[in-house]
Image: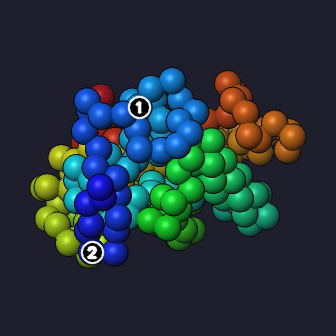
Amino acid sequence: MKIRFPSLILPPVWPHEESKRDPVPASDYDNNGADIIARHMLLDGFRSWGIVVYRCTYKSDSDWEEFMRRLIFHVNHTLEYADGLDLLDYFKPTVMDDKRRFDGVSPAIVRDYFNQWARTACETEQGMPFDCASQGMSARYRLCIMVDEEALQSVLNIPPEDVDGYNPNAFVILIEGQWKPG
């Protein structure tokens, strides 16, 4: 049985049910990344998913392109492992790329821009008010990623043959929209 949304078909997902994906690479339903994304979309009533990425370094366009290539590769690789390539049809990452606004800015500035964007984007993209979307399970209107030069280089320093694995030295800056600088 499938539940149908406009332009979206997702498996019914409840905490007590097993994964609808076959085979399930993860040991249980709660650890399968594709099932988690599908469940959050279903519970939130979202038609798309994907994180918002803020480009905050402009030293090299080719470095940025390689970073984005690796990010998309990682999403594809993770979904393939979780038997969730069907979710790519709903994957809509948003990249904020404006040198005048974002070059060298602080996480607090990115948070302010993100919150401004999220207030209108959830209505446009999902057809729901920000107050509902920001309380949902999905990260799209609650969290964003900031990539400054240090974060960019940490990802690019991963040897190409190791991009599909875990690297403790690579990072991006995750910003919660409700974060208040201390």
Task: Identify the image quadrant of the C terminus.
Answer: top left
Secondary element at image label 2 = loop
Q: Quadrant of residue 41?
A: bottom left
Q: Residue at x 53, y 36 (%)?
A: 24
Place of residue 123 in the rendered image (x, y in percent of width and height, measured from the top left)? 21, 71
Q: Of callouts 2 and 1, which one flags the residue occurring earlier in the amino acid sequence?
A: 2
* Colour mapping: rainbow
- The type of residue carrying mark 2 is Pro
Which residue is found at the position 26% from the left and 68% from the top? 5
**Neighbour class for label 2 at 10 Å: few (<14), some, many (≥20)?**
few
* Residue 157: x %, y % from top left: 80, 39
- Residue type beneath disc 1: Tyr
Q: Position of residue 49 (x, y in %)?
A: 40, 58
Residue at left offset 35%, top offset 58%: 10
Residue sitting at the far front? 1
The residue lying toward the viewer, choosing from 84 and 24, is 24
Q: Which mark is residue 48?
A: none
Q: Is residue 74 visible?
A: no
Image mark count: 2
User: Splitting the image into 4 quarters, where does residue 179 fall?
Assistant: top left
Which residue corresponds to mark 1? 29
The quarter of the rendered structure image containing the N terminus is: bottom left
Residue beneath the point at 58% across and 33% down: 25
Residue 179 visible in this rendered orientation of the protein: yes
Of residues 175 and 105, the one nearer the viewer is: 175
Placement of 81 over or under 51, stated as above or below: above
Most foreground residue, 114 or 89? 89
**Neighbour tally class for label 1: few under 14, some 14-19, many 20 plus, Cα within 10 Å:** many
The residue that mark 2 highlights is 6
Judged left or right of residue 124, residue 35 is right
